[in-house]
């Protein structure tokens, strides 16, 4: 599962940057360390009374009612103790019958033919159903060497089921009918499922627990114009007399019920392959020409991960499908990943994917097919065994495909995401058996912190031991349910080391160290590093310290396990730089007490992304007062890694004559020649700040760039010089605008503040899908703040509220509320300076906006 909350901040801020806006968070979450008393409830791993063996489903759909008519044949056996009963999860269904099935003297059915089913003997069984579970009385007591098959006929009613979503997975209906009546011309008709956490049991009866595994066969009867997708291999397609078609998908290897999936729609299938296995990309027809640009690295990923883990991709095929109105980011259903439509972009839009979001999501879900689908967390308490690995796979893929700098930048963003979450929402154990709701496990601890913990473990053990340990873990736990201790045991087996200290600290503990670092060079021939751990908890931290002196670098492996420690190193003279945590792997906040000269040296000599980033950030603060800092920042404009070029460009105080003189030649070159669109856009933005007519030709030329981000930035730069010209250009460009060009046009229209431009914003809100709707809503608010027409403003505010409340995300709610407040205040201030009808109109608008904010706040409480 890839969380939509992970990408929302970056998605929105990229759009806002083009518009020249910023957002300020006003967190309403509990402070760190304060927990709801309900979180003290112990959440045990589900007791296994019966084990699933095989699940056969035969389903058809009622689009008008949004029902699924289903038949299920479920084969099981007692786990250990004899039993005469069975409990199946089945949420919000009409259960018509439950029977015992027997064919040819055996009670277990696996991949039965129609003839076998017709010949089967069925015995009705007594059952009770409470809208959540079916409790079945079996015909006799079964032992664990005996199996049996249950037949259930039922109707699933997902829209009527009483289920709750979460911040991670916004709805838990399990089965979703998208635009089933076809009334929305801008949205395709689709059906898709979402099983995690325990929502598969909304559309078929099962034992909906992560520690269950079953083979499967799913037959879907659909209109023949539609394409279907499910787990495993498509083994038959049978035309029916009524114009429908029945597709049967078979999964020969066992997997957990939450990983079952179906998708039905008018998809284009773009075919690929890996070692003779099908690799397919299901997209809307308009995006078929771009499918390889979006997903084309998938076969290479499969090869890379297989080789890295020493364990080949184990499943029969790999398909990926993009759907509308998805309830989270993406989901690793076995052999058939579902993605939200934020991934569906043209090749031009992909040029602006500066954080490589698509690549990270695709890698994340693919890696789950080893960690999550093959070896599965035995309970939600052990979610780290799924999600921390998938999170870390993003680093591994970036490191392989795009280089270590790209991987380290991605890791840096993940680290900050976790630390911000810990600050505002409180920290948690990585493995936690006490929580209020299983959905709470899907957070920055299970994902981003867990990924960084794996990176620390890799650094501590070394690559050979770490990856051999992962191989051993997978081989010993394939098709089983696992917990963190099994990872520890595998790593201990390979390395020969006791790792309880590491797992107790990072897996079964919370928090991270805060270090105060100072230096003492007063004693001849010695360099001393004094490190103090702040706070009550003392961490055990092995790391490297690199000492740069006399033109050489010497590495020292140290271990900090006390409140305060001094590390001494022999030197011939005062070091140029002492690099604490030289590999930059610790989850840590630090105060590093050293002078600017060390940062100047660090940029030139220390190799890692974070070394150079730290130096750029330190030099940015002193660029106008220190020549060394200025020279370093100018040098960083040509850093080998594009992300640091953007950072250096964005930090320039271009209004300073010294900075302008030094930076302008480089900026002009970057704006026109850099290979990366975000670098070109950043350079154009800085040049635009100068409001110098000599650059008008450069800005106009940039309007022909293939990058929408560059086009949008150039349009805004033109607006700084001639807003009327920019407005005319925006009208011309509006027709074919996509992505971040929309943000640039929106900014120009907002400067114009004409009510006639509002339809552009309303249309973009209506046309956009998924997470992009929030970006469109923010753009819409920007123009509504400028216009005075009350019906237009109130209608627009209501449309934004409908989108935000329907999106069902507290992070989004907070930010939109924080935008609405200043807009209302601006209306009130303008009203105070006006009179007559305008004054009344503006006050009325302000009241409407404040009521809208209150409605969104109330929606957050309801969640």
Image: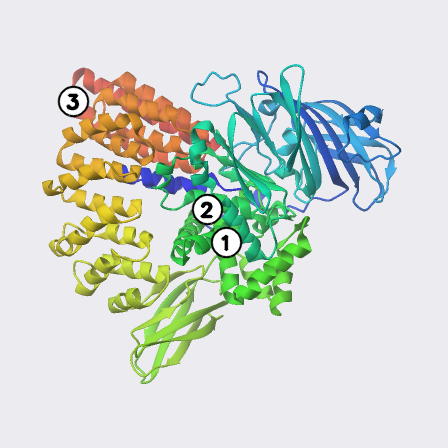
Image color mode: rainbow
- Residue at mark 3: 834
Q: Which mark is residue 3?
A: none
Q: Is residue 302 left or right of residue 789?
A: right
Q: Circle 2: is it few (<14), some (14-19), or many (20+) Cα within 10 Å?
A: many
Q: How many marks?
A: 3
Q: Residue at 22% of width from left, 29% of height from top? A: 730
Q: Nearer the viewer, residue 725 or 860?
A: 725
Tell which circle, 1 or 3, labels the residue nearer the N-terminal end.
Answer: 1
Tell which circle, 2 or 3, labels the residue nearer the N-terminal end.
Answer: 2
Q: Nearer the viewer, residue 741 or 610?
A: 741
Q: Secondary structure at mark 1?
A: helix
Q: Residue at 29% of width from left, 16% of height from top? A: 791
The spot of residue 570 in percent (x, y) is 37, 82
Name above or below for residue 359 compared with residue 204.
below
Q: CA gap, disc 2 to disc 1?
A: 13 Å
Q: Residue at 17% of width from left, 16% of height from top? A: 836
Query: Is any atom of residue 785 visible in this view?
Result: no
- Residue at mark 1: 451
Q: Nearer the viewer, residue 408 or 594?
A: 408
């Amino acid at each position: 599962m890839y969380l939509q909350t992970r990408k929302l901040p970056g998605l929105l801020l990229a759009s806002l940057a083009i518009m020249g806006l910023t957002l300020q968070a006003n967190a309403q979450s509990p402070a760190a360390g304060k927990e709801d008393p309900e979180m003290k409830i112990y959440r045990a791993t589900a007791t296994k009374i019966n084990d699933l063996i095989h699940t056969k489903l035969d389903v058809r759909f009622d689009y008008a009612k949004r029902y699924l008519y289903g038949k299920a044949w479920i084969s099981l056996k007692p786990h250990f103790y004899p039993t005469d009963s069975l409990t199946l999860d089945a949420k919000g269904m009409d259960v018509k019958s439950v029977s015992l099935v027997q064919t040819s003297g055996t009670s277990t059915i696996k991949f039965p033919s129609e003839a076998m089913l017709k010949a089967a003997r069925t015995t009705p069984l007594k059952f009770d159903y409470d809208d959540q579970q079916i409790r079945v009385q079996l015909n006799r007591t079964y032992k664990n060497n005996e199996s049996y098959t249950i037949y259930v006929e039922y109707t699933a009613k997902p829209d009527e089921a009483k289920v709750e979503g979460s911040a991670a997975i916004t709805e838990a209906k399990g089965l979703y009918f998208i635009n089933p009546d076809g009334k929305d011309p801008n949205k395709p008709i689709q059906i898709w499922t979402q099983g995690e956490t325990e929502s598969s049991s909304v559309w078929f009866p099962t034992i909906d627990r992560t520690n269950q595994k079953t083979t499967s066969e799913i037959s879907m009867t659909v209109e023949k114009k539609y394409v279907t997708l499910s787990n495993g291999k498509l083994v038959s397609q049978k035309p029916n007399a009524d114009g429908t078609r029945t597709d049967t998908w078979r999964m020969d290897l066992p997997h957990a019920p939450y990983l079952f999936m179906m998708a039905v729609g008018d998809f284009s299938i773009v075919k690929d392959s890996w070692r003779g296995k099908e690799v397919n990309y299901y997209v809307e027809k308009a995006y078929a020409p771009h499918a390889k640009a979006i997903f084309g690295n998938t076969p290479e990923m499969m090869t890379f991960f297989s080789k890295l883990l020493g364990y080949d991709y184990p499943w029969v095929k790999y398909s990926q499908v993009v759907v509308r109105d998805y309830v989270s980011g993406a989901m690793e259903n076995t052999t058939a990943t579902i993605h939200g439509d934020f991934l569906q972009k043209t090749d031009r839009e992909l040029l602006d994917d500066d954080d490589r979001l698509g690549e990270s999501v695709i890698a994340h879900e693919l890696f789950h097919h080893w960690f999550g689908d093959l070896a599965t967390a035995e309970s939600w308490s052990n979610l780290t065994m799924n999600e921390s690995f998938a999170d870390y796979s993003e680093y591994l893929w970036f490191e392989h495909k795009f280089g270590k700098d790209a991987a380290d930048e991605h890791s840096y963003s993940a680290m900050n995401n976790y630390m911000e979450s810990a600050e505002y929402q409180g920290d948690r154990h990585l493995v936690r058996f006490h929580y209020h709701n299983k959905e709470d496990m899907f957070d920055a601890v299970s994902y981003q912190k867990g990924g960084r913990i794996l990176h620390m473990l890799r650094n501590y053990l070394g690559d050979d031991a770490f990856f051999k340990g992962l191989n051993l873990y997978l081989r010993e736990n394939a098709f089983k349910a696992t917990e963190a201790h099994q990872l520890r045991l595998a790593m201990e087996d390979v390395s020969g080391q006791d790792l309880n200290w590491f797992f107790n600290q990072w897996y079964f503990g919370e928090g991270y160290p805060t270090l105060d670092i100072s230096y003492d060079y007063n004693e001849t021939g010695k360099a001393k590093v004094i490190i103090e751990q702040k706070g009550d908890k003392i961490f055990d931290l092995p790391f490297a310290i690199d000492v740069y002196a006399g033109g050489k670098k010497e590495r020292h492996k140290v271990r900090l396990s006390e409140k305060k420690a001094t590390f001494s190193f022999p030197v011939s003279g005062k070091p140029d730089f002492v690099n604490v945590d030289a590999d930059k792997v610790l989850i840590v906040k630090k105060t590093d007490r050293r002078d600017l000269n060390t940062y100047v040296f660090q940029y030139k000599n220390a190799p890692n992304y974070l070394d150079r980033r730290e130096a750029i950030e330190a030099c940015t603060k002193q660029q106008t007062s220190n020549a060394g800092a200025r020279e370093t920042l100018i040098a960083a404009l040509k850093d080998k890694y594009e992300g640091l070029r953007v950072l250096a460009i964005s930090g320039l105080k271009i209004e300073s004559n010294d900075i302008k003189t030094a930076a302008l030649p480089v900026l002009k070159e970057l704006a026109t020649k850099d290979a990366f669109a975000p670098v070109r856009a950043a350079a154009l933005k800085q040049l635009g700040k100068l409001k110098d007519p000599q650059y008008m030709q450069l800005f106009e030329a940039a309007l022909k760039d293939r990058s929408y981000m560059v086009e949008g930035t150039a349009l805004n730069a033109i607006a700084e010089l001639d807003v009327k010209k920019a407005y005319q250009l925006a009208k011309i460009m509006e027709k074919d605008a996509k992505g971040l060009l929309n943000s640039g046009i929106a900014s120009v229209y907002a400067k114009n503040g004409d009510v006639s431009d509002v339809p552009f914003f309303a249309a973009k809100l209506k046309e956009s899908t998924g997470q992009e709707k929030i970006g469109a809503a923010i753009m819409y608010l920007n123009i509504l703040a400028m216009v005075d027409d009350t019906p237009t403003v109130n209608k627009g505010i209501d449309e934004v509220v409908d989108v935000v409340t329907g999106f069902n995300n507290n992070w989004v709610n907070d930010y939109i509320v924080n935008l609405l407040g200043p807009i209302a205040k601006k209306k009130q201030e303008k009203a105070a300076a006006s009179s007559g009808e305008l004054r009344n109109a503006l006050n009325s608008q302000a009241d409407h906006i404040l009521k809208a904010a209150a409605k969104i706040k109330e929606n957050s409480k309801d969640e």
